[in-house]
Structure formats: C-alpha cells, structure tokens
Amino acid sequence: MSSSFKAYSVHLFTATGAVFAMLALLEAVQGDWAMMFLWLVVAFIVDGIDGPLARRYRVKERANTIDGVLLDLIIDYLTYVFIPAFALFQSGLLPGWTGWIAIIVITFTSVLYFADTRMKTADNSFQGFPACWNMAAVVIFAASPDFWIILAIVVFLAIAMFTPLKFIHPVRTARWRSLSLPVALLWTCLAGWAAWAGFDQPQAVTLGLIATSLYLGLVGIVQQVVPART
C-alpha cells in the first residue's frame, strides 16, 4: 500500500465525520437527543483519532490536494457547534427568548472563533474556549440545570472564546498529557454512557461528567498560572 494512498485514506476517515453529523442531525429533528449525542460521540472519537493519523502518515506532504485543516474545521463546526446549538434550542431546555439568544450567540461567536488565526497557541493548545459546545451540551442534557444556569453558561463560554485563557488539546498539548488524555477518554465514556441511558444515567455518571469537564476546561488556565519546569 503506497504512502500516498494511506495519506488520502486519512482524509476519507476524517470525512466520515460529516456523515455522522448528518445522522446526528436526523435524530435531532426527530427529537431523539440520546441517539443524536451518540452519533456526536462517534464523531468526537473520529476527530480525536484523525489528527494523530494525519501526522503519522504526513498528509500535508502526501495528500496535499485536500486541505485537511479546512476539512476538519467544516466537520467540527457541524458537530461541535451547529447541531448542539440546535439541540439546546429545540429540546425546550431554554424556553422562549432564552433559546433564541443561545442559538444566535453560539453560532455567531463560534464561526468567528473558527476563523480566528490566533486560535492555536505555541504548545498546541487553544487560546480561548475552543467552541466545544457538543461537550457543554452533553453535560447540560445530563445535569438538566435551571434554564437561567444554562443561559449563563452559554454567555460565559461565548465570552471565554475571545479571551487569552488557554484551553488544552488533550492529545496535542504535551504538558500533563499523561493525565489529560485519560481524563478525556473517561469523559468520552461517561458521555456515551449518559446518551446510551437516554440521559437517565446514575448520579455518579453525572458527577463524573461534571468533574472531568471542569478538569478539561480549567487545566489549561492552571498551566498558565503554574510555570512549567525547565
């Protein structure tokens, strides 16, 4: 098997995320939030795997007729932003005008963030909240807080996208990766569990989702405060 074929196969693997996004959207239209999130979890897993594969098979050199970064951004906007925003709006968790505010704020600010050339930091983390609304939405669906709390979370995270705060990439951020990567894997398992249970999961799963989300959301800021050892 040629190196070029392997490289293009990575692009094909990444592109499956668009299919999973469509399957998630179809479930969302039917109001089956559990199945919607299960497809989004599958897309999340693909997104976590394709990056290391792309670097291993050097797709920028061997499959450069397809822009892998652009391909990834298109799929990420669908799975990380567009579909979760629709779910928050359509599910009734944000009634009336609060739903309209959330869906406008999420989609508008996120598309600007995705186009921001300052998105990535030198250590392969993100500058500002990386528009991971799929992760936030899973926790919101699992915990079902009051709509005022949900709206406050949406506004806070939207503002956080345009701050100098650092948010790690659990695979690419090298510092504390031996802890961050297992936490990210645990979060994925807990999210899948909650969705599979139709968001009628044990309380321990809910608490685990909240705890792992707080770690993933705050550890980059802690790294900014605590200098790395030289």
Image: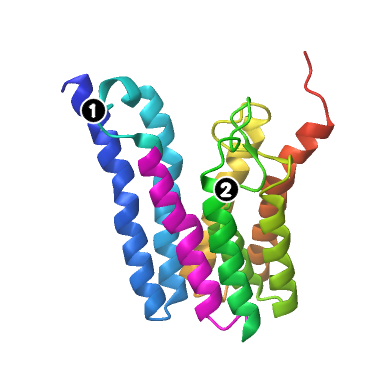
**Image spot of residue 108 (x, y percent):** 56, 60
Pointer 1 residue: 6
Image quadrant holding the C terminus, namely top right
The residue shown at (38%, 78%) is 29
For the view shown, which residue lies furthest in the bottom direction?
96
**Image spot of residue 55 (x, y percent):** 40, 25
Image quadrant holding the N terminus, namely top left
The residue shown at (35%, 35%) is 68
* Side of 99 relative to 227 (left or right): left
* Side of 147 relative to 187 (left or right): right
- Please count the marks in the image: 2
The residue shown at (38%, 66%) is 24
Frontmost residue, 66 versus 42: 66
Helix, strand or loop status at disc 1: helix
Instruction: Reply above or below: 40 against 184.
Output: below
Q: Which amino acid, mark 1?
A: Lys
* Side of 197 relative to 3 (left or right): right
> Which segment is the magenta one?
70-94
Q: Is residue 104 visible?
A: yes
Frontmost residue, 215 versus 28: 28
Q: Which amino acid, mark 2?
A: Tyr
Disc 1 or 2, which lies upstream in sequence? Answer: 1
Pointer 2 residue: 113
Q: Give the crowd class for mark 1: few <14, some 14-19, many >=20 residues within 10 Å.
A: some
